[in-house]
Amino acid sequence: MWYMNEERQLMLNIAKDFVAKEIKPVAMEIDRNCEFPMKLFKRAGKLGFLGITFPEEYGGIGGDWTTLALILEEIAKSLPVLTVAMGAHSLLSGGLLNMLGTPEQKKKYLLPAAKGDIILACGSTEAVGGSNQIEFSTRAVLSGDEWIINGGKVLISNIVVADVYVVLALTSEKLDPATRAGMSIFLIKAGTPGLEIGKPEHKLGWHGSMTGSISFKNCRIPKENLLGPLGGCLQAMFVSATDEFMSCGPVSLGIAEAAYEMAKKYSQERIQCGQSMFDRFQVTRHKLVKMYTEIETLRALVYSTHAVKDKGNLVLAEGRLLKIKGAEVAEYVAREAIQLFGGVGTVIETGVERFWRDAKVMAIGGASVEALMDNIAFMMKNKMI
Ligand SMILES: Cc1cc2nc3c(=O)[nH]c(=O)nc-3n(C[C@H](O)[C@H](O)[C@H](O)COP(=O)(O)OP(=O)(O)OC[C@H]3O[C@@H](n4cnc5c(N)ncnc54)[C@H](O)[C@@H]3O)c2cc1C
């Protein structure tokens, strides 16, 4: 492949070994029991996968975005939910720490996060307003040397297991709709009095990503736990969110490839009237070719976008396209894979339906594809693209 080089191949080989020996044997069990893949997450930290793009000074490996994509694609072929936990930790929360943190904050939080010694969660979404920050009501007020936080967040990944929550809160009366000034970010340690953690929701897919609510009732945190500029964090949030949307490209690619490979193998082995389904039905062959076409189209988009990002571009629109196109391809391919399996495709133990469940959530978790299209349309209108 045009995007491979020696260092990337080395990291990919480590990921392939990790997936084959440690992830694959337990992937179905994690999905069925909805358990957070703690052991695998910690191992990912030790292997350097949680800090690929972080500077070496803060525990990262100073690698590029293409390397990260290769690792995520490989892991998603077996256990997409691990990549979801990694995204909330390294890209949303870790990305904000890396961009906005003081050297002290990076030493205290980013360094152990890169190694998997602590787990991060990022709290933005609220019950009213969803992803529309204009309607948010979680508020932080400075009182002496402490911030007092009140409000709540919903559908937050990595709850319960997180050691530190990276939380958005208003620090002025309301968010300025034009400049978006007035929103700040805070670092809140698990166990802080006034921080209440809800129960993980039972979800369609992404089983084990521990998604749920957190609330703040006069939650007091030290003044120095403000992350980044007072009232001016949304630009950084836009960038870290873009990185997370971009990561949905390789994750969706991995999901689609896994479902496709299973369906291809099955249709070549399943006998119908003395022939394999593949040999007997043109419709089966055409389905597989269409799935393959979509996968290769997505692969081209994923790695060309990552190559552009590696040149230092922010890829604000292209990163969003990866989430939109990725979710579409993964859901389509996984759906067709179930169809090719027939009745056994609906049986959980077959292992193919979980890829469709995980693919479906890709179009919503983190941001709905419709909201992302709105973002891109805004960029078009303002001649940014
Ligand atoms: C599994 C999972 C994990 C998540 N993890 C996190 C996390 O770690 N941190 C976090 O902060 N949030 C997280 N979220 C929340 C996620 O970001 C939101 O669910 C998502 O942004 C959609 O917001 P909403 O659910 O409030 O839906 P709404 O905003 O109410 O949207 C509902 C529907 O309305 C339509 N819609 C909304 N906005 C627009 C628009 N601008 N243009 C056109 N149509 C629109 C879309 O069809 C959308 O699906 C997670 C969600 C899920 C499901």
Image (spheres, rainbow, N blue to C red):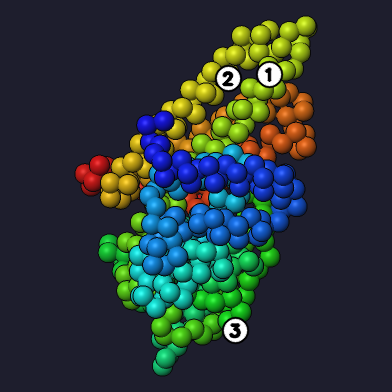
Element type where label 3 sits in the image: loop
Determine the CA span between mark 1 and mark 2: 9 Å
The image shows residue 351, relative to residue 242, as above or below, that is above
Residue lying at 66% horizontally and 28% vertically, measured from the top left: 262
Q: Which residue is mark 1?
A: 267
Residue 379 visible here: no
Determine contact: label 1, label 2, CB under 8 Å: yes
Q: Around disc 1, counting alpha carbons within 10 Å, would you say few (fewer than 14), some (14 to 19), or many (20 or more)?
A: many
Left or right side of 121 for 298: left
Q: In the displayed structure, does residue 79 sit left or right of residue 149? A: right
Q: Earlier in the sequence, mark 3 or mark 1?
A: 3
Amino acid on which the number 1 mark rests in the picture: Ser
User: In the structure shown, which secondary structural element does the residue marked by tag 1 occupy?
Assistant: helix
Q: Earlier in the sequence, mark 3 or mark 2?
A: 3
- Against 23, residue 214 (above or below) is below
Q: Which residue is mark 3?
A: 193
Say which residue label 2 marks.
Answer: 288
Placement of the N terminus among the 4 image quadrants: top left
Q: Which residue occupies 77% across, 26% down?
A: 343
Label 2: which secondary element: helix
Q: Callout 3: 10 Å neighbours few (<14), some, many (20+)?
A: few
Task: Determine the CA span between mark 3 and mark 1.
Answer: 56 Å
